[in-house]
Amino acid sequence: MFKLLRLFKSLQNQMVFPNYTSKVLTECYQNNAFCIAANTSEKWDLLSAVSLERKPIITKNLNDMEQKFIKLLSEIEYERSHKSDHEVRKEKDKVKVQQLKSAKNTDFEGEVIQQTAQDLEDLYKDELKHFKFSDRKTEADYKNDLKSVNRVLDQSLLLLIKQKIGNKMYWTLPQGINLEGETMRQTAERVLKECCGGSLNAKFLGNAPCGFYKYKYPKKCSKDDSIIGAKIFFFKAQLISGVPEFSNQQKIEYQWATRSELNTMLQKDYKRSVSLFLVDNETE
């Protein structure tokens, strides 16, 4: 549009159709002013939402391809690697034993008393034999406790809460409206504290939002006709310690959800916006 205005202005300066260009310029300015006025008349609620993640605590089980690759790497390591200090020491101990058997004097008496590499190896094997490995599944997994942060230790978990939007309840990330004088990051921090209590320790990753989503309010549910909808800015945070604590008055329903569970819990468009900043292989 601005290129068109410059073209008309140049034509007017060259005295080509001065009356016509003046009329067109006037109409363009009026239409442009009308468009700007129409855009500024739309008002939106600004909200900050927190994508609070609990990162995996243990590694995943290897699939068949990964197991074959690990086996191949082990074979290459065995064929090409140099001997370790323990293996070198073990060979030296064998040489000393042979020397002691064939020697006629007892100059090696001080060295015989020390602990050999084979003795250490036997101790390590005995310790491994009595060592009890922890179960990959926790008590929360066996009880199917969806509110526990200790479930599914090999996957990322995302905190979801049920919030009323209009006349219906939806699973969403913790979110709240921006107050006057707050930055969007400060709003996100306040929302997390109000929602989950002060005992939960989380680390926010940056001041800029990582995602965006907007929706329009139903006309029947809108209290203010001038506000047409909500614009939500997502902020990423990682759980450091603690668990959500809700008062008896709040009665908030929440869940630590896996990536696969997001597909059935979140609305399609909302889930698409959230999945854009969830960077792992489980996101579909």
Image (tube, rainbow, N blue to C red):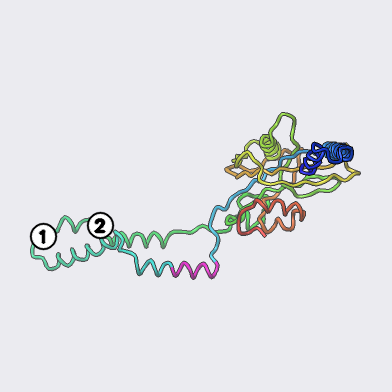
Q: Position of residue 247 (x, y in %)?
A: 72, 38
- Dot 1 amino acid type: Thr
Q: How many marks?
A: 2
- How far across and down, in percent of the image, does residue 50 sit? 68, 43
The local secondary structure at tag 1 comes to loop
Identify the secondary structure beneath mark 2: loop
What span is in magenta? 63-72
Q: Residue furthest right?
A: 220
The N terminus appears in which quarter of the rendering? top right
Q: Are marks 1 and 2 in contact (CB under 8 Å)?
A: no
Q: Nearer the viewer, residue 169 or 273?
A: 273
Res 223 seen here: no
Q: Which residue is mark 1?
A: 106
Q: Nearer the viewer, residue 4 or 72?
A: 4
Query: What is the crowding at mark 1: few (fewer than 14 residues within 10 Å), some, or many (at least 20)?
Result: few
Q: Position of residue 251 (x, y in %)?
A: 76, 42
Query: Disc 1 versus disc 2: distance between alpha carbons?
Result: 18 Å
Residue 160: % across, % down: 71, 48
Residue at the far front in the pictured view: 15
Q: Main secondary structure of the magenta part?
A: helix
Residue in the picture at 76% in, 53% down: 269
**Residue 115, numbered label:** 2
Nearer the observer, 269 or 77: 269
Residue 3 numbered mark, or none: none
Task: Residue 70: say if magenta.
Answer: yes
In this picture, residue 88 sits left or right of residue 124: left
- Rendered position, 171 above or below 41: below
Res. 129 image quadrant: bottom left
